[in-house]
Amino acid sequence: MTITKSASAAAGVLAALAWLPIARADVQPPPCATGQVVATALPLEAGVGHRGIPLMFSLSPGASRCTLTGYPGVDSGAGGPLIHAGRTLRGYLGGLPAGVEVPPTVVVGQAHPAQALVEGLAIDGDGNPCPTYTDLLVTAPDTTGTVSVPAVIDACQLQVHPVMVAAASA
């Protein structure tokens, strides 16, 4: 009789557990919220009058995995007149691969940041050097918190490309 009661109780527990949500690897986490990711800049890249600043979006300490899709908001900071970065899929120094026309959704995890590239021209249309900015004002995609990110770039115009999976570091 004791065995029957135990088996019956175990069956009841298993039936109750069947309704609990299970974390599945194929289920995407929710979009990142304001404050859930931290933006930082990598060193300046340059090429034939073009300048680029890779922006990295990493999880804030204690934050859960989340997703970023689309373009970060980017404006110039200190050093010259305000410039709003235009949104483009790709540019001279990088961006999405040729043939990819829709920005991907990137899962940001503790060891898996997202990256977006900001590009600018170092020389104006008359051949004069552009102002040197010492920071960028950055808003992660689909969030509202703008932060000042230290980054030195000489530019007369800016463009930003969509977030992508960050390149593996060597």
Image: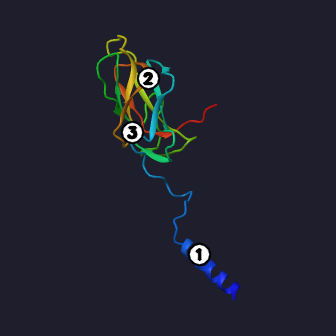
The answer to whether residue 97 of the structure is visible from this angle is no
Q: Alpha-carbon distance for marks 1 and 2?
A: 55 Å
Query: Which of the 4 quarters of the picture holds residue 10?
Result: bottom right
Q: Which residue position is annotated with label 1?
A: 13
Mark whose residue sits in front, 2 or 3: 2
Q: Residue at x 44, y 52 (%)?
A: 30
Residue sitting at the far top = 128
Whether tag 3 and tag 1 are in contact, CB under 8 A, the answer is no
Question: Which label is found at residue 150?
Answer: 2
Sequence-wise first label, 2 or 3: 3
Sequence-wise first label, 3 or 1: 1
Q: Amino acid at mark 2?
A: Pro
Residue sitting at the far bottom = 1
> Is residue 88 found left or right of 93 in the rendered image?
left
Q: Amino acid at mark 3?
A: Tyr
Query: Which quadrant: the C terminus?
Result: top right
Q: Amino acid at mark 1?
A: Val
Name the foreground residue: 100 vs 79.
79
Query: Which of the 4 quarters of the picture holds residue 135?
Result: top left
Q: Which residue position is annotated with label 3?
A: 71
The answer to whether residue 94 of the structure is visible from this angle is yes
Q: Position of residue 70 (x, y in %)?
A: 40, 42
Query: Which quadrant: the N terminus?
Result: bottom right
Q: Is residue 23 above or below residue 147?
A: below
Q: Residue at x 55, y 60 (%)?
A: 24
Helix, strand or loop for disc 3: loop
> Is residue 25 found left or right of 32 in the rendered image?
right
Q: Alpha-carbon distance for marks 3 and 1?
A: 47 Å
Q: Position of residue 155 (x, y in %)?
A: 38, 19
Q: Alpha-carbon distance for marks 2 and 3?
A: 19 Å
